[in-house]
């Protein structure tokens, strides 16, 4: 019998973005915007949003991964939403039909003039060694790094 293990970690990732809090918040709310930037992993990875119901009690389902490699499924349920300020959701990630993590994710949006200070806190439980906190932190970073081009396209200018 395979040993059952759990490891608890809290991953915090911060970014300051050149867009207002409502614009950054809308990148989560709008499923079309989400499709453009919410791709965990490296540049070759792809994601597909299968369901996105942005409301408390709603949730979503997406798949992601590198072509021809292990595929991940992310299933999430929104537990709390405060417009332009906070999103909390419970999330489970499965890799090739094996549950590897379950988490509580909090996203905080703080206005900083015309910019937004974004903080992601991912309180994760790693199941049976299926992931690492370092991999999750890297994945969040790679995902969030895809947000700034979305805002440049919307404004037609480079805010830097």
Image: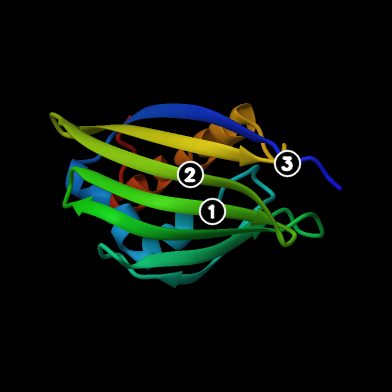
Residue 52 position (above or below residue 102):
below
Q: Is residue 26 left or right of residue 125?
A: left
Q: Position of residue 151 (x, y in %)?
A: 33, 47
Q: Secondary structure at mark 1?
A: strand
**Mark 2: secondary structure:** strand
Residue 30: percent from left, percent from top = 32, 63
Residue at x-position 86% and y-position 48%:
1
Residue 107 horizontal/vertical position (percent): 32, 41
Question: How dense is the environment of label 3, judged by Cα within 10 Å: few (below 14), some, or many (20 and up)?
Answer: few
Q: Nearer the viewer, residue 7 or 121?
A: 7
Asked if disc 1 and disc 2 are in contact, CB closer than 8 Å, the reply is: yes
The residue that disc 1 covers is 92
Q: Position of residue 6 (x, y in %)?
A: 63, 36
Q: Residue tagged by mark 2?
A: 103
Sooner in the amino-acid sequence: mark 3 or mark 2: 3
154 in relation to 41, above or below: below
Residue highlighted by disc 3: 4
Q: Are marks 1 and 3 in contact (CB under 8 Å)?
A: no
Q: Is residue 113 visible?
A: yes
Alpha carbon separation for disc pair 1 and 2: 6 Å
Judged by depth in the image, the label closer to the viewer, 1 or 3, is 3
Foreground residue among 78 and 39: 78
């Amino acid at each position: 019998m395979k040993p059952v293990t759990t490891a608890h970690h809290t991953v915090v990732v911060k970014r300051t973005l050149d867009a207002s809090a409502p614009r950054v918040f809308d990148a989560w709310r709008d499923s079309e915007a989400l499709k453009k930037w919410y791709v965990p992993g490296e540049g070759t990875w792809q994601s597909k949003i299968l369901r996105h119901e942005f409301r408390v009690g709603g949730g979503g389902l997406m798949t992601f991964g590198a072509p021809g490699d292990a595929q991940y499924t992310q299933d999430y349920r929104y537990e709390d939403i405060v417009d332009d300020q906070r999103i909390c959701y419970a999330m489970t990630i499965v890799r090739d039909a094996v549950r590897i993590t379950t988490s509580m994710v909090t996203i905080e949006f703080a206005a900083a003039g015309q910019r937004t200070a974004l903080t992601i806190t991912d309180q994760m439980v790693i199941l049976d060694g299926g992931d690492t906190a370092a991999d999750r932190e890297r994945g969040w970073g790679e995902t969030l790094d895809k947000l700034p081009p979305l805002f440049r396209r919307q404004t037609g200018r480079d805010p830097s």
